[in-house]
Every structure is written in C-alpha cells, then in structure tokens.
Amino acid sequence: MRAAIVAIGSELLSTDRLDTNSLRITERLERHGVELVAKSVVGDDEAAIARELARRLAEAELLIVSGGLGPTADDVTREATAAALGRRLIDDPEVWRAIERRFASFGRVPSPNNRRQALVIEGARVLANPRGSAPGLRIEDGPRTLFLFPGVPHELDGMLAADLEPWLAARSGGSALDYAWFKTALRAESEVDGQLEPAYAEFGRERITILAGIGEVKVRIAAAGPEAERRARLETMGARVRALLGAGVYGEGAETTLEQVVGERLIERGWTIAVAESCTGGLLAERLTRQPGSSRYFAGGAVVYANQAKSGILGVPAALVEEHGAVSEPVARAMAEGCRLAFGTDLAVAITGIAGPDGGSPEKPRGTVHEALAGPEGTEHRRFRFPGDRERVRAYAAQAALEIVRRRLLGIGGAIWTEEPAR
Amino acid sequence: MRAAIVAIGSELLSTDRLDTNSLRITERLERHGVELVAKSVVGDDEAAIARELARRLAEAELLIVSGGLGPTADDVTREATAAALGRRLIDDPEVWRAIERRFASFGRVPSPNNRRQALVIEGARVLANPRGSAPGLRIEDGPRTLFLFPGVPHELDGMLAADLEPWLAARSGGSALDYAWFKTALRAESEVDGQLEPAYAEFGRERITILAGIGEVKVRIAAAGPEAERRARLETMGARVRALLGAGVYGEGAETTLEQVVGERLIERGWTIAVAESCTGGLLAERLTRQPGSSRYFAGGAVVYANQAKSGILGVPAALVEEHGAVSEPVARAMAEGCRLAFGTDLAVAITGIAGPDGGSPEKPRGTVHEALAGPEGTEHRRFRFPGDRERVRAYAAQAALEIVRRRLLGIGGAIWTEEPAR
C-alpha cells in the first residue's frame, strides 16, 4: 500500500512553521509497511486543496490529510474533499449534538461557526475527537481510503492512536518495514557509494539510502515483508554492507555517534583522554562531553587560542611556535604530549589549524589542520586539508580527531580521506 | 508571481528528517512579494519527481527544486526535470572541468560517479556552486522559471544569495517586504510578548512575530509597501520595539549572535577573556570562537571535567571542592579567578553545574548551574536552575554565561530569567 500526506494551512507555508505532524503520521505508516510516496503542504484555498487531493488519490491508495477542520471561514478541508470526490456535504445532527455536549461539559454553548464542524461528507465515517471539537472523517472511495484529521498536534496524536493505528494494523497483517544504519566518518560519499555497488545489485537500490553530513556518511538499509522474513533479510543485507564497508563503519544504529563509540572503546580499554584545541576552539571537548557519563574517561581539555596559552597551559616551547608556526607538525605533537602530561591521561589528542576566514597563506591555506595523538606507545601525526568555511573546517577537524582516536583504539591503520600525504 | 517549492529526497520522507530548506527559500520569496502556493516532498523516484514538477508548473510561474543533484545513482533530479520539460540532458565539458578543478584544489580527483554532475538540461543556465560539486540550473520554460538547487543546506544558502535573490530582486520591482530582527537572551517568551502589547496594538499583530529558541527570544517585524514607505515604517516600528524591550535586546539583525556582540564589546573595551567550563564541556569556548577574528580577545579556555583538572589547571583548592562540592558558589568563583590568572586575561567566566542525566540530588537537582565572572573590579556569581535535558541545560548555561559577560561590559544590572534568588 502506498500513502501520501497532505497538510492544510496557510501558516504552514510561512517562514517559521513546518508541518511536523507528518513525522508522527509517517512513523505509524512505516510501522505497518506502508510506503510514503509524497507529502505536501497547501494553503487554505478550497480549489487548491481539492486539486491536490485529487492528484494524490491518483498515486496513493491511502491519503492522510491534516488541518482545516476548524470552525472558522478559512477551514475548508471538508468542502474541498467533497469537491475532489464529487460528493455532497450533509449536516449531521448527531455530530452536532456531540459538539453541543462537549461545549456543555465546559459550561459553554457552541458558536454558530461551530455548526460547520457538523458537516459530514456523504458516506464518510465520523471519527470522534475527544480532545477537540472537530471530528475526523474516514472515507472509502473505491480501492482508496482518505483520513481527515485535525491539525492540532495533540488532537491529531489521539486520533492517530485511536483510528489510524487500528485501521493500519487490520490491513498490514504483520507486514512492515525494518531499518538498520551504518555510519562512517571521514569518508567520501562517492567512495562509499562505489563500495556499495554489489549490494545495490543484490538487494535493489531503493532499499539502500546514503545520507551525507560533514565528515559523516550514513547508510540506511530497509527490508520489507512478513516479520521473520524481513528480519532475516535485514540480517543478510547488514552482513553484506558491513563486509563491503569494513572497519570504515564506526557504528550501527540511527542514533549512534562517533563520540559515543569512542567513549565506549575508552571504557573497554580502561583509558582516559584529554584534548588540546586551537582552531576548533572547544568543539572537540564539547562533542566528547555531549555523551552522558563521559566523566568516566574524559578528564578535560585546554583551548589554547593564544600562543601564550599554548606555552603557559600546555608547556609548548615558545621557540617551537616561533620556528615552525602555531599550525605545524612539531607544535601539534608538543600540544598533544603537553596535554597528556597536564591532565595525566592515557591519551591526548591535539588540533591546530587554520579555520579561516583569515590566517591562510600559500603554504598553509585555509583548511590546513595538523592533528596529533599522544599515547603510551608514542605520538602520531596527520596533516589535513579540509574544504569549506570556518564552521565546516572546525566540524571536519573535530570529526577527524575522533576518528583518529577510534582508529588508535581499534588498531586500524591507513590514510583518512582529506588527509594529505606525509611530506 | 506564484511559486511552489519541491524538495527531493527519500530521506525527507522518513520519520526523522524534515525539509527545512523550504523555510529559507520562503524567506527570500516573501521578501520579494512572491506568493508560495504549495510545497511538497518527493522521494528519489524519477517518474514521481517528473510528475510532481509537471503538476506544480501548471499552478505556479516559479518552481524551486532542491536536492537530488549529487553524484550517486539515487540523485535523479536532473533526469526527472528533463523528462518533465521534454528536453535532453547534455554532458557539459565546461562543468566537468570546474568539478575537476574543485577536486584538484583539495589534491583529489573526482570519481567516475561525479561525471553525472556535469549533465546539463538543454537550454539551462548553469549556476556555479562554489561550496560543493553539484552546480545548480536555471531553466526558462515559456512564462515559467525553474531553479534546481543542491539540497545540502550550506550549499543551498550560498546559491539562494548568489542566484535566487538577484533574480527575484530584478522582477519584484521594489514591491517587497522588509524585515528587522531584535534578539534577546535569557528572557521568557511570554514576558517579551507582554512587553510588546503596545506595538501589537499600534502596528498589527500579524506584522510582529516572536520566535523562541533555547535561552533566546527573537522578535521579527515586517513592513510592506513601496520602498521609501516601508523603510520609514520599519524605522518607526523598530524604534518602538527597541524602546519596549530596552537593554534586553542584545542585538539586531537576523544573523547577529550573542557571541558576536560580546566580541564587539570586548574589542571596544580592549579587553581579553578566558573561560573555565565544567558541565558545558567546551560549548562556551566553542561559541566564542565561532566568531571569525575571536583571537583578538579570546585567549583560551580550560575544560575541567575531572576535579583533578580543576586543581591542576586552574588551582582550585581540592579542599574547597571537598567541602562545598564541585557544583557550588565557592568553586565557581575559584574557577573564574584561577582561570583569569592562568590565562592572564581581563575577564574570566566559569561554569559548573549538573547537566544530567545523572549527578542530581534533592539539594542540587539536575539543571543547577553556578556561574562566576572574575574581572578587574572583582568577582560576581549567579546561581541558575535550567529546565530540560542534558543538551538544553548545557545550551542555557553557555548562553547565560555570554549574557553575564555582556551585562558586565555594558554595566547592566538586575536578575536574569531562570536565575535563582541569592540565598
């Protein structure tokens, strides 16, 4: 079964409001294996709504409409739907009595406007809305079904649980979609895509989605069908993706973060870490401490923006900065080693670079970042050239530092994307 | 002129992603008096995209499409648009050379997949995308215009400014909306709303929008009409709002940030600053250094998560932590004063608190945060109780620290919202 969602309301076409109802509707649909093919937002315009509904009914068997069922003149979803289906609107005395009763329970009487909420599309089933005055409607139209729900999130939620969910459950017969996620850091999207080619061929391209962020590429796989079958299929697909991407996968699961995985590996190893940051200005420490419980392994960090702070807090010799510049391999190494001493940790990672917009030069253009990791077995160094503006360079640099730590903890070697060859 | 927005991407039909690009596109449209009639999201399905575009072209003269221009096989916006318009796709060697140059500037070569990004729709104008590899396209089709933009927000933003805005400006003929923004930190939304009542009465409620974030309330005012008239109106409205909100307004302009304003005040004063952070874990330093040129006033920061680091790096007496606990007024004061000494700055601000989820107690529940500011005239302290989860408490705490610094720099006294009375 395919579904479409239409949200009605001119306010949802403004600069500061989004249709978030669709996320909760989508969750119900996914749970029952219903494929969402499109979602759209239309203003309070009867002709436009009618046109939109008619179109969506041509491409989906299930149409879920939210909003425009209120009592005011700009609530025209009932009229538009009747027009789209070529049906009449009928004043339903029973619905009107329910509205009167609801108002009476608050010691009030409905206004004449509310009378419009008692209009029911011919042949529709009225869906009670105990949280508000606008009832919902379910309409069967040949092989197609429309649900009209109120747009108020709280009222909608109640009706999704009471009306949509049981209707979907009765039809899905245990057939649903399951997902799995695989996350990689500091990999090129096109490279991950290339590695997945055999999986596309084997499982179908529409089942595998690649999502790229800054220094992060996420792969989502989806399996459909009856429960046992789709679980088995997800296992098979997952094993294939895991094998194709190898140690590049830092974690699985939609919510897994690189800082979380690094934290878990540190706890496993019983190690502590500290960080020394220049151009990232605290971003790396901030990411590590986003993780609840990070105090078990994170001792602290030094943001050494001024060169004086590099010497004063981390003991980086002023002569080293003088000779090689603050953005250099020797200074990155000295920062990491000084940080390890100052915080008394097992590991310390240091970042020094040029995030821009100023400070670049022909030999050290913007995006040049040196990172070093000091540990019990010595200090390693990598030099990067990250693309983008200040914000992106900082984000890449923090992500790369976490990936360097992850690789050290797992003993994974090799070059990292955007890393420059050693000179 | 009427417009429609279509966002392409199967991930935008999932339960955890929304098309937020449309908000920024809408802002540009509104500014030039273009009416948005619908927006929709379609998955990576060539036939469905082609159908959607053809329909929207029947109801709008301007169609803005984002997403699906990447190098991977599921990026099919180019093909779908060509199909919807009945035009051919042509491999453009000049576009390909630009992609090669971009990759070369990072010392890399494009993958064979990237070749698809050099496909151009017959008759289209290629729009350079300096922030990414996917160029945009502008296509005239009789009285209609289509823009194809990349979906990556950062790349889209650049192209909205460089391509959409000038195109709209050339057509709007001075009939447009102008906006002004007024930003406040650590104020309650309802309080700001109350203060604005007289302005609602005077200028109309629909012209004044309040947008609330974490520890930040933004007021947007809008004026319409011919240029001279709307400019004058915006001046009048702005003066009124400024007077009503007083020193609570930290800055004006949509993009102005609290860290930027603090930086400007520090530069004016010729002062430097350092930060000492516990529960915010580097977030305050990260925010201060987001600002380009922050090295002029920001010396550095110490993230002292472990108590040992509080003593070792900042010289906070271990006995003080022992006696009062790490989250206490004496420790916050000692952190600020120790930080000021360690970095040799004019000001130092310290944050220590309980972000959760663990670590709370009946006397010091989650959200309890002590902040102190040390300066040439002594040290001040405030105690907060912030609402929400770990992420929100951290965001509030960093925002409050910046607001404390701003108030000190401007000599503004008084209590801050969410601040607990001194005991």
Image: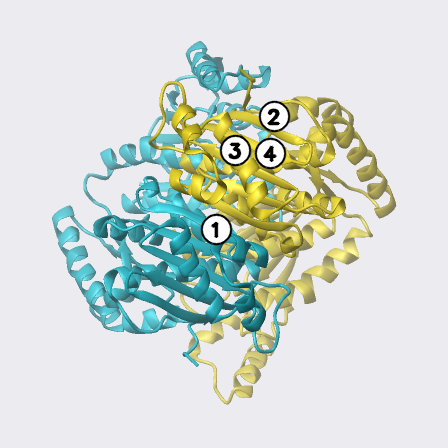
Chain colours: A yellow, B cyan
Pinpoint the chain carrying mark 2.
A
CB under 8 Å between discs 4 and 2: no
Residue B260 screen position, x and y as percent = 32, 49
In this rendering, do the residues under marks 2 and 3 share a single chain? yes
Q: CA distance from mark 2 to mark 3?
A: 22 Å
Q: Callout 3, which amino acid?
A: Ala
- The residue located at (82%, 51%) in the rendering is A174
Q: CA distance from mark 3 to mark 4?
A: 10 Å
From this view, report whether residue B186 is shown above or below residue A168: below
Q: Between residues A16 and A336, which one lies in front from this camera angle?
A: A336
- Residue position for label 4: A373
- SS at badge 1: strand
Pinpoint the chain carrying mark 1.
B
- Residue position for label 2: A416
Q: How many marks?
A: 4
In this rendering, do the residues under marks 4 and 1 share a single chain? no
- SS at badge 2: loop
Q: CA distance from mark 1 to mark 3?
A: 18 Å
Which quadrant is the N terminus of chain B positioned in? top left
Mark nearer the viewer, 2 or 3: 3
Q: Callout 1, which amino acid?
A: Ala
- SS at badge 4: strand
Q: Disc number at residue A334?
A: 3
- Residue position for label 1: B302
CB under 8 Å between discs 4 and 1: no
Mark nearer the viewer, 3 or 4: 3
Q: Callout 4, which amino acid?
A: Leu
Residue B319 screen position, x and y as percent = 55, 67
Mark nearer the viewer, 4 or 2: 4
Q: Callout 2, which amino acid?
A: Ile
Q: Quadrant of residue A363?
A: top left
